[in-house]
Image (cartoon, rainbow, N blue to C red):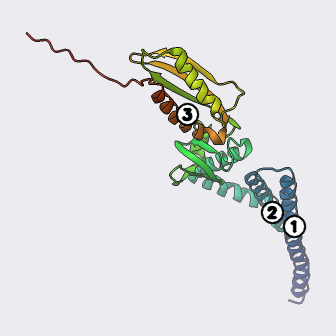
């Protein structure tokens, strides 16, 4: 008994020192990890990196480094980190099998952050939904439709399909087709359409607008109009051209054909 007490005291003092060292590692490690996270955010903000990328990268780095600090503290008190890592690996495998869909969404979210097919505010067609991107998280992406409905789409659904980003470029081409009757003068129609385009302030001069007779359809001569404008002015130009063309055609008595059917009655 007399020999046991000194051994316990010796073991307790040794373990106490290790425990204090582990706590110090945790405290200092946490401070260092937080400082690294702040440094990453600062550097990425200086380079005008997308806030979503900054948040994702800093959080991922913080988590990875903090796990390393915890393992270092556990090793200090004598816990075998190799067996601990094996337990974590086994648990991770079990959780991974149970959450395959979530992991797929996480991986897709990482790819979205990495390749950046769109950013906040972009108008896209992705995952079977059209609207403006309002939020990109690790597992899902939030899209607001034109009629202001919020739709939450799994990231895997977005990355596994085609993504159309309508606002990725600064300019867009407006393609329109106007049909007139076969009695209309081709030269006059082209002059009217060209005049409407030249008067519109939002239509760009370069690339040059395009107005040509493109098709002799069943009941109409179809003129194709292609003009370029800034992306944010796309719909304004589209609707303005539609209204102005109808008004000018009416002024110049150019008729716009509509589907009709002639029925011949045969009397026996």
- Along the viewing direction, whichever of 179 and 5 lies nearer the viewer: 179
The quadrant of the image that shows the C terminus is: top left
Q: Which mark is residue 218?
A: none
Q: Position of residue 259 (x, y in %)?
A: 34, 24
The quadrant of the image that shows the N terminus is: bottom right
Q: Residue at x 55, y 15 (%)?
A: 187
Q: Secondary structure at mark 3?
A: helix
- Disc 1 vs disc 3: which is toward the camera? 3
- Along the viewing direction, whichever of 206 and 172 lies nearer the viewer: 206
**Residue 225 appears in the rendering:** no
- Say whether residue 194 is left or right of residue 215: right
Q: Residues within 10 Å of mark 3 (few under 14, many from 20)?
A: some
Q: Secondary structure at mark 1?
A: helix
The reply to whether the C-beta atoms of the residues labelled 1 and 2 are less than 8 Å apart is yes
- Distance between the Cα atoms at labels 1 and 3? 64 Å
First reached walking from the N terminus: tag 2 or tag 3: 2
Q: Position of residue 108 (x, y in %)?
A: 65, 45
The residue that disc 3 covers is 241
Rendered position, 231 above or below 194: below
Q: Residues within 10 Å of mark 2 (few under 14, many from 20)?
A: some
The residue that disc 2 covers is 66
Q: Which mark is residue 29?
A: 1
């Amino acid at each position: 008994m007399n020999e046991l007490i000194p051994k316990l005291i010796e073991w307790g003092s040794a373990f106490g020192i290790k425990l204090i060292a582990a706590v110090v590692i945790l405290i200092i490690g946490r401070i260092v990890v937080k400082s690294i996270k702040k440094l990453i955010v600062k550097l990425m903000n200086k380079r005008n990196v997308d806030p979503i990328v900054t948040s994702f990268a800093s959080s991922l780095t913080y988590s990875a480094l903090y796990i390393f600090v915890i393992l270092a503290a556990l090793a200090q008190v004598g816990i075998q980190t190799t067996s601990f890592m094996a337990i974590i690996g086994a648990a991770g495998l079990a959780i991974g099998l149970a959450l395959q869909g979530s992991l797929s969404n996480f991986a897709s979210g990482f790819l979205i952050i990495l390749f950046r097919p769109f950013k906040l505010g972009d108008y896209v067609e992705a995952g079977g939904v059209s609207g403006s991107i309002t939020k990109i998280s690790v597992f899902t992406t939030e899209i607001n439709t034109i009629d202001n409905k919020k739709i939450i789409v799994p990231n895997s659904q977005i990355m596994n399909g085609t993504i159309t980003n309508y606002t990725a470029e600064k300019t867009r081409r407006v393609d329109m087709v106007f049909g007139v009757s076969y009695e209309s003068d081709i030269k006059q129609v082209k002059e009217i359409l060209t005049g409407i385009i030249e008067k519109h302030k939002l239509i760009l001069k370069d690339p040059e607008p395009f107005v040509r007779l493109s098709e002799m359809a069943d009941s109409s001569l179809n003129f194709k109009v292609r003009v370029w404008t800034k992306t944010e002015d796309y719909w304004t130009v589209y609707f303005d051209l539609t209204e102005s063309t109808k008004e000018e055609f009416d002024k110049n008595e150019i008729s716009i054909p509509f589907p009709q059917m002639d029925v011949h009655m045969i009397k026996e």
